Image: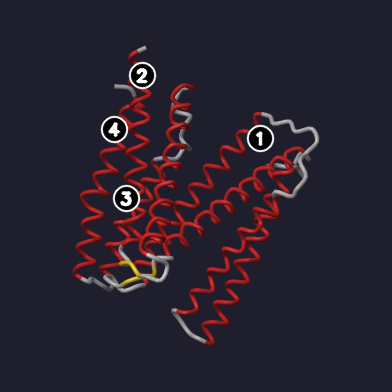
Amino acid sequence: MTRLKKKAWHELSVVFGIIVFISIPAILHLSNQNAQGWGWLVVCTIISGPMILGGYLSDVRNLKHYDEREQIILRKSFSIWSGVFSLYLLIFSFASFFLIGGGKTVPVVWMPVMVLTGIVLAQCAQSVVILTQCAKEDDE
Amino acid sequence: MNRIQKQSWIIVASVGAAFVVSCGIVVYLALTAGFPAAWKGFIFTCAGGLGYFASLLVKKDKPAIVDERDLAIRSLAKTNAIRGAFIFLVLFAMAVFLYQKPGSLIRVNVLPVSICLAAIVSGLFESLTYIIEYGKDSKAMKGEPA
């Protein structure tokens, strides 16, 4: 397994796992419990950790460790990540606005859940792009 | 100063001015109507987006030569723009979530407004990267340490 494949699987499992199995259930559970205070703040900080981690794992800062071919794949995957993330947020927010109606209200939990699900989707798309590209090259 | 630098300065100036004006409006609303109604004043930051249209009016450079360095700066600017918007969105989402009581309701128009604000922040980060990176280059050309 190449470094790039390992990176893709690692990111997919870590970010996806933390967000799907910890962050979203924790937010929904705490929201139902109507939790408040410093404990809530600490939990929110822990929950937002993977979100920021997800963004930084997806960036293109440490490209020096990779060869030219891998750098191109990583750049392409990062642009896919940002494209999917922004498109999802645009569709989610404007669809909610037009379907529900401007004057109506939604639960406040929608805000972080919107961003979290966007990250999950974008992370999946990025890892799939890397794995597909690697598989293509293996075939060749 | 090339076209991108001029456009960047226009965007930074317009977003900066819109932000200062919206802060003034928030202070005014806080004194007259109080919070949370005063938070609506920050919506005026969206007026900073007009800078993007103004930046289109800047004339194109006559010898439009794009070298390796320009491409590297452009790539860095795009990355920083996405990173800036992402961090803003995460912090904004968590701030709204913490500010409101959990289980409470928000107006649905907060969602598209947050996306518009994130787009403006992304433009601001991109412009700042252009200004800083081209500024470094002009220093290096004069022989100063970049």
Type of amino acid under label 3:
Thr
Which residue, given by chain and number where applicable, does mark 1 sit on? B70
Type of amino acid under label 4:
Trp
| For the residues bearing labels 4 and 1, Cβ distance under 8 angstroms | no
Which residue, given by chain and number where applicable, does mark 2 sit on? A136
> Subunit of mark 2?
A
Write the residue at 62% across / 69% down.
B20
Q: Position of residue B85 (x, y in %)?
A: 49, 52
| In front of the other: B84 or A115 | A115
Q: Which residue lies furthest to the top in this view?
A: A140
Q: Using residue A43 as the reference point, say whether residue A94 is left or right of it.
A: right
Write the residue at 43% across / 24% down.
A70
Which residue, given by chain and number where applicable, does mark 4 sit on? A9
Spatial CA span between label 2 and label 4: 16 Å
Q: Which of marks 3 and 4 is in front?
A: 3
Q: Which of marks 1 and 3 is in front?
A: 3
| For the residues bearing labels 1 and 2, Cβ distance under 8 angstroms | no
Q: Quadrant of residue A115?
A: bottom left
Label 2 CA crowd tier, 10 Å (few <14, some 14–19, many 20+): few
Spatial CA span between label 3 and label 2: 28 Å
Q: Residue furthest right?
A: B62
Nearest to N terminus: mark 3 or mark 4: 4
> Subunit of mark 3?
A
> Subunit of mark 4?
A
* Secondary structure beneath label 4: helix
Kindly indicate whether the residues beneath marks 4 and 1 are on one polypeptide chain: no
Write the residue at 43% across / 46% down.
A87
Type of amino acid under label 2:
Lys
Q: Which residue lies furthest to the bottom in this view?
A: B32
